[in-house]
Image (spheres, rainbow, N blue to C red):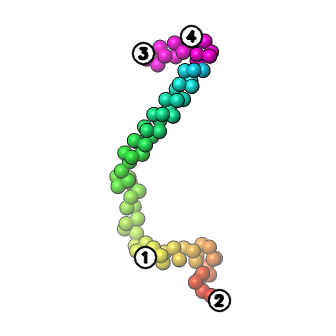
Amino acid sequence: MNQEQIIDALTHLPPEAQRQVVDFIDFLQARYGKAVHEQKVQGIRFNDEPFIGMWKDNDTLINSDQWVRNLRTTEWAGGKDLNDDH
């Protein structure tokens, strides 16, 4: 049965039967939809994603702690050193 035949059969059912079909579809989606989604998520290999390693040649991130401190100093404190107690 193809989609067109399914839609045709559905439209010839009485309204209560159509609601039952929709309820059954919801049930099937709840039951199987999550399993299909989990399979798709588990199939992702992050090492194959283009964003992995994109910063590996960035010399400014050799010391990431210092990079974050510098960023905070320039962006959050208006140029004032946050480590300065004065």
Q: Report helix, strand or loop for mark 3.
A: loop
Number of marks in the rendered image? 4
Is residue 36 visible in this depiction of the protein?
yes
**Crowd around label 4: few <14 · some 14–19 · many ≥20 (10 Å):** few
User: Residue at horizontal 65%, vertical 89%?
Assistant: 86
Check disc 2 and give the amino acid type.
His
In terms of sequence position, does the residue under pointer 1 or pointer 3 come before the other?
Answer: 3
- From the top left corner, tell me how far across and down residue 75 is, in percent: 60, 72
Looking at the image, is 19 positioned above or below residue 26? above
Residue highlighted by disc 4:
12
Question: From which residue to which does the magenta span run?
Answer: 1-18
Q: Please say whether residue 13 is one of the residues in the magenta stretch.
A: yes
Check disc 4 and give the amino acid type.
His
Residue highlighted by disc 1:
63
Tags 4 and 2 in contact by the CB under 8 Å rule?
no
In terms of sequence position, does the residue under pointer 1 or pointer 2 come before the other?
Answer: 1
Real-space Cα separation, disc 1 to disc 3, in angstroms: 62 Å
